[in-house]
Image (cartoon, coloured by chain):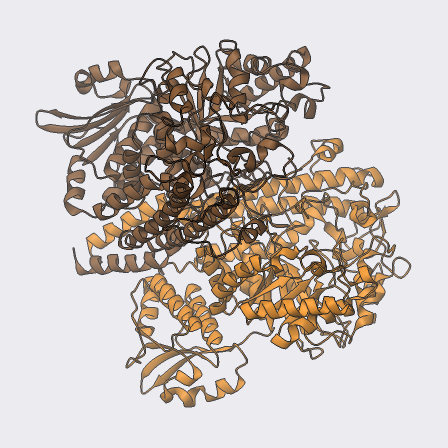
Chain colours: A orange, B brown
């Protein structure tokens, strides 16, 4: 390299390091930074001398632009695209019917086993000439193949002898945005909604395009734009033209748009006097509405419905049931290939039974009664996205019904956007849980991917953590949860460690000194947040409404099951929710094998102990120490682990740009502060009942319980807006 | 340049043009792009061979970082800073006491005339050795000098023979943020508040630093962080530590923090039973509160107060007056050098008199009674930031009282962030208005800068248009209004054309083919918005509450003066608000010269005709045509002018990055759509009264009045949140 080039590059580094905002995290995992390792760079360049690309439809052009953008950045080299196939070392990208016939033979077998939207990435050598081929039966498969190929290079994998045949194992992989029309985001901690309804349809924010790119890169193929606590206005012509504009932006990237359907919409915007699903006029209104929507958005995905849940209207308002309600909407969208996702997140203030049992009790009897284009959306646990819950007993319990997974990516109960917690580890824990419904080894993942009971539709949804913050997710590491959700929706059998490794390399650095310690940090972060918030099966003891920080003492809310005391049931005898056969008997909603394991205090996993049992303060755990001491020391362990995370991160400074390094630094300090807050507030509160001293090894609180109880956060983010 | 350099540069251009988000406008006018003109670049480089910089206090380090960042970018050259003065072609930066003694003689006279926070930029030649000096009596002056010097280079001015001695003509130059604690922004159209209260004080967003840089670069030295419709919580310890964190970020840039004081705070957060300003306990509470604030923020600026206005609490709730209220707060902050800005924006639903008269009537009698550290904040017009108003009659009417200007930068009544309108032209129009209070040529600017009647404090405030959008202001051109406000606060006698030229060159391009047509476009845009919204003196006929789009028909609001019909008074005879001596007599609040001009239908400027007179539909204007026809054709003219703006912008594509070009393109289409909406809705509505046909030359509306009246925008941005 000439001196002038070197000095220019040096200058650029100086210059761009000054322009720190340019590393604000907006690029997500699609940074495409130039590969520093010269040897590796040259190997890649040699293998990818030229690009042959065929096709110029919207989706193929997206793939074309991405491969150019990606390779230009990573290999620091200008590529000119042509259809012609160079003599050797060519990258060839096309759908099956446009692949140069000379390769047909070598791809035949791969194509036979290739599933919908899947892709083939294959290195082929003919007469000492090397070719790398990215192909698929369909255009979207090509786009997925391009992103996958770029990931190989971003993560410094060898591309010399590739033979990858991959396809999504779940049909519908979507984000649920709890975004309101006023741009507030329920449980949103990364700024306001990225949907600028006021400026739509005429103003197309660059962000919409990059949102689609990011989702396509991890295989997400659907997005529900609006909050499940929905507003009927989204279905009016004024808003439908805005929705249509977004659908048009997302279409080339294979992303379908879905909306939440307000059950009472026929009254609120239709002028009808009822929303009774058995009422002909109501059915007709929804049929007409569907027709109107599909005339503007031919590939509209369908509706997501939260009915008769937390005050939302639904069929029960008219003495009908969930099947009646779902049928009506399913009938409306069926002619156009649309689906209805009906949420099972229901619990009633009038039902005195254990809240954890109510969804199962209400839905399982309906098994087999829902239409084929309806899928029941079930949260990963029976309560509500807690740091740890056993998997929801509905998984595996409705063999004749489409059932999908709802994970939460936004950290409603896990520290908002100031705590670093790697959720793919949590997702994997749920997906790999054994349901035993068809004997050992029948996991939740097998239920979700349809392999356990054959299903008409399979789907996985994640409640988005996306907002208008520069870096999309508030915490730079919260991007990993969006990324990881997408990867697991594509293949629920992937390992969290693999995902962490991929994401760290694509987003920050490929240096082993960075990747190895940070992979451990990510993997451990999942248990750490449980340790300092809700150890040993505790749950839902967050402060109410905003769910920010500890509030185990809250007991004054109208609905009993909204009060933390309902969940921990601490008293002089002990603590925990007795869900065993001599308690609420929630254990009986699981397969008999699990029922036995959970029901028995000895066999119940200690990490779920207080979920299933009310346990004496002095009960001895496996380590021989009492429950009280274990609780104290686990809280302390969580705090210490955060301190360790902070120390590890400090050592990462050489591998990270200044802005993101400082941001994470500040955020880990907040996390440590709040981990201590959790430990002190909870231990002081529970001590009133345990009446036992804090064990050695637990740092004593410096403030009083009264102080922690006095803290108020009227403007904590993510609260449901008052117009709702 | 070697081929490798060239190809690398070509690649970089390709690459960065792909990374379109990297030109998202975040840089504002501080882009510091490399100068393409080789000759010019070399001249600059030769003159600025080295930099000698002395001092390393927080403010001087900010200046140092900025000069390095700026020159590295503009001159594409690495500078290393040292104290040593090179033999020649050196840039020398230091405060007076650190300037190399060899230059003392040549700077003596300049220093004698140098005012506070002013700076000297001077080219000095000694024995054929050239030096460029940036100096000041104080550190902030050096920072201002650095920004000013960088602007010379950004705008391609010659720096060969510089002799600039400049200083702010107004003491306090501040932004008013109408930002709420829930991050909504009242009248905000660029996303949510940039103040992330939840993450403060521990998380310092890079944006806070760049906000301070941008403001310092135009001389703004204060910011009111909170909405004038205020919340007392901001004064609690929980929030004060957050405010303190921001004050610490802004301090090096010479920016003081101010807060809005909720008059009822002593009750709401102080636990008192009253907020009566004559009540000892209340006074003591404010004294203690001030002491507490200043113990954390020694340079806290003071309070901004909206009292007994639009439902806000104030002294009148206790039978006291504005002087009583202001005195109490002024006494509390006086010991620490703080000030109180007391808003004159008052009008009562119980006062049947013309709303335009009420502020004057209520405040002028108090002239001379306010303490020295109180300044009365008066909006530029007597109604409320309309597209055009005559200047507020209070300017010049209170010779013995500190009076400051309040402009609105955010476009509440001027098309939100989708309309391009260059407000410095509006500001200049107001500032250069002749009050005649001391005879001809005594302008509003002379009142504001204290030259007309000597004042203890002079100040100018602008209601910020800043939000969390990437480009800060929503519309790329709305940045010019923030910039222009700052420049006019520094010197109210600057010309709008000068400001437009500066801003265009720093923000987009120095190419004449761009600067010349775009300067005209900016200057004309101010009249264009008046033409298609409120021609000939019409005002406040926007739809109510959100003020988005036309609503001349609205007449059902509880308070008469909240209804557009109150302002246009259209009837079968004519249209306009009679404020002449035989009307509301508002004209008499102006000097006798102006009273005569405004009072007489013939001498009243036609641009203010319907502000001061109720005029017959067939009244002949100076052009010989009727009022009705003139109204129709002016609306049409406004529409046509927007179409012309769109055409001009299309021709600018070669000079603008792709992202901003497309954004402005889309926004101008929206502006054209909405200009037509205004024209059609207003003309159809007024036609009911005028009973006259639309003249030739006016495009006929394609939709009915009913249609326009049916439009509803429940989620238009900027509405006051419901918790308020």
Q: Is residue B500 above or below residue A597?
A: above
Residue A79 percent across, percent down from the top left: 30, 68
Q: Is there any visible trace of residue A603 in the rendered image?
A: no
Q: Residue at x 58, y 16 (%)?
A: B322
Which residue is drawn at the image coordinates 31% and 67% (left, top)? A42
| Horizontal and vertical percent position of residue B310 | 60, 29
Residue B401 versus residue A493 in the image, above or below: above
Name the quarter where the N terminus of chain A is drawn: bottom left
Lateral position of residue A69 relative to residue A303, left or right: left
**Apparent side of residue B48 relative to residue B412 in the rendered image (left or right):** left
**Farthest residue toward the bottom?**
A105
| Residue most extreme to the left | B127
Residue B82 in view, yes or no: yes
Residue B275 position, x and y percent, is 67, 18
**Going 73% across and 60% down the picture, which residue do you hit?**
A272
Dividing the picture into quarters, in which one does residue B633 lie? top left
Q: Is residue B313 left or right of residue A152?
A: right
Q: Nearer the viewer, residue B443 or A468?
A: B443
Q: Is residue B508 left or right of residue B271?
A: left
In the foreground, A719 or B710: B710
Residue B439 vertical placement versus A583 (above, below)? above
Who is closer to the viewer here, B413 or A507?
A: B413
Counting from the top left corner in percent of width and height, residue A15 is at: 31, 46
């Amino acid at each position: 390299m000439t001196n002038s080039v070197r000095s220019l590059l040096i200058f650029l580094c100086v210059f761009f390091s000054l322009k720190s905002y340019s590393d604000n995290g907006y690029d997500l995992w699609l940074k495409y930074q130039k590969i520093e390792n010269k040897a590796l760079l040259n190997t890649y360049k040699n293998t990818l001398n030229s690009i042959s690309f065929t096709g110029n439809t919207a989706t193929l052009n997206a793939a074309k632009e991405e491969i150019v953008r990606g390779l230009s950045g990573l290999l620091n080299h200008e590529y000119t695209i042509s259809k012609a196939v160079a003599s050797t070392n060519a990258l060839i990208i096309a759908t099956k019917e446009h692949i140069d016939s000379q390769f047909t033979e070598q791809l035949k077998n791969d194509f036979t086993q290739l599933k919908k939207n899947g892709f083939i990435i294959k290195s082929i050598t003919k007469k000492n000439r090397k070719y790398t081929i990215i192909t698929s039966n369909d255009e979207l498969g090509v786009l997925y193949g391009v992103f996958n190929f770029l990931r190989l290079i971003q993560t410094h994998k060898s591309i010399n002898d590739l033979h990858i045949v991959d396809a999504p194992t779940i049909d519908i992989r979507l984000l649920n945005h709890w975004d309101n029309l006023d741009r507030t985001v329920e449980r949103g901690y990364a700024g306001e909604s990225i949907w600028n309804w006021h400026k739509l349809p005429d103003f197309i924010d660059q962000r919409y395009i990059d949102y689609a790119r990011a989702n396509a890169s991890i295989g997400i193929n659907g997005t529900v734009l609006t909050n499940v606590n929905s507003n009927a206005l989204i279905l009016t012509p004024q808003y439908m033209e805005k929705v249509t504009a977004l659908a048009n932006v997302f279409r080339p990237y294979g992303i379908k748009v879905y909306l939440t359907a307000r059950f009472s919409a026929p009254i609120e915007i239709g002028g009808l006097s009822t929303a009774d699903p058995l009422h002909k006029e109501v059915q007709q209104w929804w049929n007409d509405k569907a027709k109107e929507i599909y005339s503007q958005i031919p590939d509209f995905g369908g509706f997501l419905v939260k009915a008769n849940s937390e005050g939302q209207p639904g069929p029960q308002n008219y003495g009908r049931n969930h099947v009646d309600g779902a049928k009506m909407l399913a009938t409306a969208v069926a002619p156009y290939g649309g689906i209805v996702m009906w949420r099972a997140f229901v619990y009633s203030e009038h039902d005195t039974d254990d809240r954890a049992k109510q969804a199962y009790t209400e839905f399982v009897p309906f098994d087999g009664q829902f239409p084929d284009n309806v899928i029941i959306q079930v949260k990963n646990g029976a309560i509500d996205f807690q740091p740890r819950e056993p998997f929801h007993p509905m998984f595996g319990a409705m063999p004749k019904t489409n059932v999908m997974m709802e994970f939460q990516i936004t950290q409603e109960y896990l520290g908002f956007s100031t705590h670093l917690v790697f959720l793919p580890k949590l997702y994997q824990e749920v997906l790999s849980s054994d349901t035993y419904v068809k004997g050992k080894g029948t996991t939740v993942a097998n239920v979700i991917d349809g392999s356990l009971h054959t299903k008409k539709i399979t789907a996985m949804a994640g409640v988005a953590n996306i907002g208008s913050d520069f870096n999309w997710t508030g915490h730079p590491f919260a991007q990993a949860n969006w990324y990881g959700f997408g990867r697991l929706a594509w293949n629920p059998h992937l390992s969290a460690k693999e995902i962490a490794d991929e994401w760290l390399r694509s987003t920050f650095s490929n240096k082993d000194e960075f990747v190895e310690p940070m992979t451990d940090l990510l993997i451990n972060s999942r248990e750490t947040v449980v340790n300092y918030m809700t150890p040993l099966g505790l749950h839902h003891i967050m402060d109410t409404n905003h769910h920010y920080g500890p509030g185990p003492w809250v007991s004054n809310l109208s609905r009993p099951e909204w009060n933390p005391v309902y969940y921990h049931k601490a008293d002089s005898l002990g603590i925990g929710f007795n869900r065993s056969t001599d308690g609420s008997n929630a254990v009986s909603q699981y397969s008999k094998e699990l029922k036995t394991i959970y029901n028995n205090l000895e066999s119940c996993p200690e990490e779920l102990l207080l979920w299933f049992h009310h346990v004496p303060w002095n009960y001895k755990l496996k380590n021989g120490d009492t429950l009280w001491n274990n609780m104290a020391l686990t809280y302390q362990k969580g705090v210490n682990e955060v301190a360790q995370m902070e120390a590890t991160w400090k050592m990462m400074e050489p591998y990270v740009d200044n802005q993101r390094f400082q941001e994470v630094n500040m955020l880990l300090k907040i996390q440590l502060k709040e981990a201590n807050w959790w430990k002190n507030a909870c231990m002081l509160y529970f001590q009133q009942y345990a009446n036992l001293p804090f064990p050695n090894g637990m740092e004593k609180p410096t403030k009083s319980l009264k102080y922690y109880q006095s803290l108020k956060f009227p403007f904590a983010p993510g609260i449901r807006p008052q117009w709702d």
